[in-house]
């Protein structure tokens, strides 16, 4: 009886393993799908005459079976209202640019635009860049994915920025949380709620809050604090050139 019980136990064990292994693989696959990320970019003319603006996206062709992946682009105005949605396929080696379809400044209307690029589910190995050509101020912005390995990366609720000397500087704060959010800007350190030097009680989903900084904020540690996830694109003009970059959240 002991030998028979042992055989039954082993048989049950291997049947259980046979069930759990595929389940574990499904869990890993699900994690990879969830880890797929969007890219957000704010299009602005930075105070110069606008010429052209486009977004470039590169994705892993093998993540979608070796075919030409597609990327979905959504464009929103400052209030979060969607202006357009369009889909573009990459070339055979995973690259696509909105320049082949639209000049983003054609939809501009004088106010910043938020552009979201969504790669196919499961495609976590990807990258994106924003190119803006305004008169006398061409700018290239490397964009951060909103998620990395399934956890928030390019978006967050606490975002520090190191600001040096500037002639003019702006924070372009976009709400990527899916719901309304409040946000504040602090100097030196994050303070108590509603004590920031700039406050906005409501940024709508996919909406943009533009904060034009003054010389009082030069040579400082600027902290953006939000109730829900946002992305922060920093614009700095030193009088000779215009630079823009995505700030990295710490929380």
Image (tube, rainbow, N blue to C red):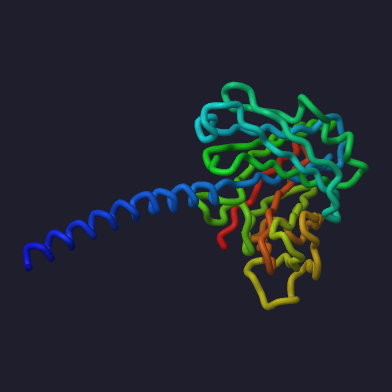
Farthest residue to the top: give it.
92
| 33 in relation to 20, above or below | above
Camera-nearest residue between 196 and 61? 61
Seen at 76% across and 61% down, the residue is 216
Q: Position of residue 230 (x, y in %)?
A: 69, 58
| Occupied quadrant, residue 94 | top right
Seen at 79% across and 68% down, the residue is 199
Q: In which quarter of the image is the N terminus?
A: bottom left
| 236 in relation to 194, above or below | above
Camera-nearest residue between 145 and 13? 13
| Occupied quadrant, residue 51 | top right
Seen at 75% across and 36% down, the residue is 241
Q: Where is residue 33 in the image (x, y as percent from the top left)?
A: 53, 47
Along the horizontal axis of the image, is 214 left or right of 106? left
Along the horizontal axis of the image, is 211 left or right of 11? right
| 4 in relation to 206, above or below | below
Camera-nearest residue between 230 and 210? 230
Q: How many marks?
A: 0
Seen at 66% across and 42% down, the residue is 118
Q: In which quarter of the image is the C terminus?
A: bottom right
Q: Position of residue 68 (x, y in %)?
A: 61, 26
| Occupied quadrant, residue 213 | bottom right
Q: Where is residue 16 in the image (x, y as percent from the top left)?
A: 29, 58
């Amino acid at each position: 009886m002991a030998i028979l019980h042992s055989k039954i136990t082993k048989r049950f064990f291997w049947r259980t393993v046979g069930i759990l292994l595929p389940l574990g693989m499904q869990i890993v696959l699900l994690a990879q799908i969830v880890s797929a990320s969007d890219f957000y970019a704010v299009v602005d003319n930075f105070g110069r005459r606008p010429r052209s603006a486009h977004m470039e996206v590169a994705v892993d062709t093998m993540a979608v079976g070796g075919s030409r992946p597609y990327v979905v682009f959504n464009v929103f105005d400052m209030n979060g209202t969607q202006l357009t949605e369009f889909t573009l396929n990459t070339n055979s080696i995973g690259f696509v640019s909105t320049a082949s379809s639209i000049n983003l400044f054609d939809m501009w209307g004088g106010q910043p635009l938020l552009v979201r690029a969504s790669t196919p589910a499961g495609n976590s190995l990807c990258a994106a860049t924003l190119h803006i050509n305004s008169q006398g101020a061409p700018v290239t912005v490397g964009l951060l994915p909103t998620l990395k390995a399934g956890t928030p990366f390019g978006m967050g609720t606490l975002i520090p920025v190191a600001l040096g000397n500037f002639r003019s500087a702006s924070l372009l704060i976009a709400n990527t949380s899916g719901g309304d959010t409040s946000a504040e800007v602090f100097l030196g350190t994050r303070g108590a709620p509603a004590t920031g030097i700039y406050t906005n009680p409501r940024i709508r989903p996919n909406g943009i809050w533009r904060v034009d900084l003054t010389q009082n904020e030069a040579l400082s540690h600027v902290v953006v604090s939000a109730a829900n996830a946002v992305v922060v694109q920093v614009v700095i003009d030193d009088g000779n050139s215009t630079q823009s970059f995505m700030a990295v959240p710490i929380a």
